Image (cartoon, helix red, strand yellow):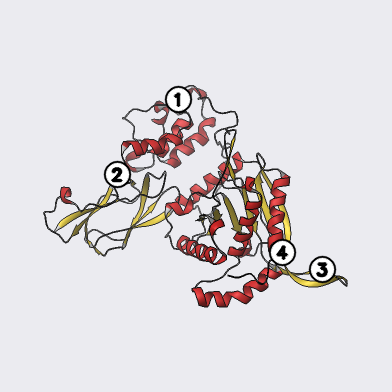
Amino acid sequence: MAEYKLLLPSMGEGVMEATVITWLFNEGDQVKEDDSVVEIATDKVDSDVPTPVSGKIIKILKQKDEVAKVGEAIAILEIEGEGGSTASEEVKTETSAPDAETIKAIEEPLNPTATSHVEFSGDLYLSPLVKSIAQQENISESELKTIKGSGLEGRITKEDILAHVSNRGNQPQQAVQQQAVPVQAASTPPAVTSAPASTISVAAGDEIIPMDRMRKIIAENMVKAKHIAPHVTSFIETDVTNVVKWRAKNKDMFEKREGEKLTFMPIFVKAIVKAIQDFPMINVSINGDNIIKKKNINIGMATALPDGNLIVPVIKNADQLSLSGLAKAINDLAYRARNKKLRPEDTQGATYTISNVGSFGNLMGTPIIPQPQVAIMAIGAIVKKPAVLETKDGDVIAIRQLMFMSHSYDHRVVDGSLGGMMLKHVHDYLQNWDLNTEI
């Protein structure tokens, strides 16, 4: 028999560590190749780690809520093979711990003020993410030592340091030991801070529900997004009768041919992609005083999860996919999102986002722009309404399928003309949908 070290696999660019949520097997259990053995969480997504070999779990090295680095062993399995049961004789895998140069290359972009940042001694353990936040917020090591960590062995977690930053303005000035504030670009927004928390009275019978990890991340990202970007929202009502007719005509054939459901979402995404191609300056990000015009069109798709949380998987290179390809990609991402099968890279790289609030029966919404994107579109419910139609014989009133769309955009770089015209082009593509479109 031989020992095999199960390593935490690479989880996408910039992801250096993950937290163990729960083990799906116990020590002593037999596992088969490709069995999911542990659920892990990163700042991006929850996912499962499968084992590439069959064997018996003889030692779990990372317990629930402990943090493991990419390439670090999280469990030891006993497998068939020659040799003694020593760690030095483990079966080698393609995944290995990142070297110092790789770690440096990933961490450096997190600290844009590298020429003027806070240094930390080896006396205080900090994850790369926590260290980056501390440097960006100019938190000294002595100040860090005043933070009570909630992680393993009192380690400071991301939530701990963000809570400290939020409460920083409420502390007496002499209690906060700060170094000189690093020079930032004039257009760099200030650190996200919150107003002093008001006292909430709890009455008899009230239930206190702690936020789970994902809800905390969502809350943090939403506050950050509203803080950074001045939001403007435009609305339009669109006649999608042709879209409804076309889908009704093709959905059974498509499902029989492809084994996939044909929803409205690939049609909406197709129209949005065409409008982005008409107005490429909506497909940008802001970096200081620079506008980064994105080459790829990657569409984020806001997806509600069974536990009530929200995640945004990304359709990569959506402009290169046919309607059929979009339908398959959307169905695959939605299924994996709802079944915790997404990989971290599945939620990265979006350049524009769509949110289907109509799936909840809502007519319209004012969506929040995910950073670092500059625009997002919300699709409302499709409702039958009487509408005025122009015909060669004059105006008539007919029953039509109408839908509201709302377009939120970052007024720092997207003015009403660009944001409104882009929305109008999506409207035109949907309202004039060709009933003979092939899929």
Q: Earlier in the sequence, mark 1 or mark 2?
A: 2
Left-right relation of 49 to 214: left
Given residues 169 and 320, the one toward you in this image is 320
Q: Earlier in the sequence, mark 3 or mark 1?
A: 1
Q: Residue 226 appears in which quarter of the rendering?
A: top right
**Mark 2, secondary structure of its residue:** loop
**Mark 4, secondary structure of its residue:** helix
Q: Residue 120 appears in which quarter of the rendering?
A: top left
Q: In percent of the image, x 50 and y 62: which residue is there?
A: 329
Neighbourhood count class around disc 3 (C-alpha, 10 Å): few under 14, some 14–19, many 20 upward? few
Residue 200 in sight? no
Say what amino acid the circle numbered 4 marks. Answer: Gln
Say what amino acid the circle numbered 2 marks. Answer: Ala
Tag 2 residue: 97
Q: Quadrant of the C terminus?
A: bottom right
Say what amino acid the circle numbered 1 marks. Answer: Thr
